Image (cartoon, helix red, strand yellow):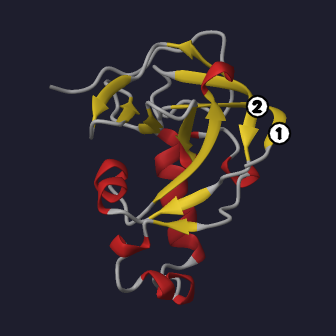
Amino acid sequence: MNSMDMEVSGGCQCGAVRYHSTQMLDNSHLCHCRMCQKASGSIFAGLVAAPDDTLVWTRGKPAIWRSSEHVERGFCANCGTPLFYHDVNNGRTNLMIGSLDNPSAFPPGANTGTEGAVSWFATITSIEDGGATETDREAWASAIKATNHQHPDHDTPEWQATPRRQ
């Protein structure tokens, strides 16, 4: 696994937790194991690692749940965004690609944990658009933008996360 010097930042949806790294590993992958499915709430977890000694939490701290004897999973306690998978024994933290400010920079190079892959995974790129018209999509995007509480995809000097509802 090779290391790349690069500036990377990311964080949760509400902005309460932000991180930065100056180095990344070239292990971008999709993990299909059942534990990653549950942790991400999706059919796979897109992950890429930063060496632990280069990862800095720049705003807030993630909540951590120990999903096994060797693994910690980090998430935002306010909005619930999954942030990382960390094997406590290997010196790196696998960040959720979707939590990065620029997820496009890390196309997956492998599928792992494929014993848990859903049977229809291979067909997802052939799914048709859902039938919404361009006008429908534009109206939906406009409505979301008008009420958006999501943190932007870059660091901000200040940010007040919207409190979670009880």
Precedes in sequence: disc 1 or disc 2:
1
The percent coordinates of residue 38 (x first, y second) are: 28, 54
Contact? badges 1 and 2 (CB < 8 Å): yes
Residue to which mark 1 is pinned: 4
Quarter in which the C terminus is drawn: top left
The percent coordinates of residue 148 (x first, y second) are: 48, 37
Please say whether residue 155 is visible from this viewpoint: no
Q: Could you tell whether 162 is left or right of 146 in the image?
A: left
Residue at 66%, 52% (x, y): give it.
27
Q: At numbered mark 2, what does the secondary structure look like: helix, strand or loop?
A: strand
The percent coordinates of residue 137 (x first, y second) are: 53, 67
Mark 1 neighbour density, 10 Å: few (under 14) some (14–19) many (20 or more)? few
Residue 140's place in the image compared with 49, above or below, is below
Residue at 55%, 40% (x, y): give it.
95
Q: Disc 1 residue type?
A: Met
Residue 162: quarter of image: top left
Please say whether residue 136 is visible from this viewpoint: yes
Which numbered circle lies on residue 23? 2
Q: Disc 2 residue type?
A: Gln
Residue at 82%, 39% (x, y): give it.
4
Which numbered circle lies on residue 147? none
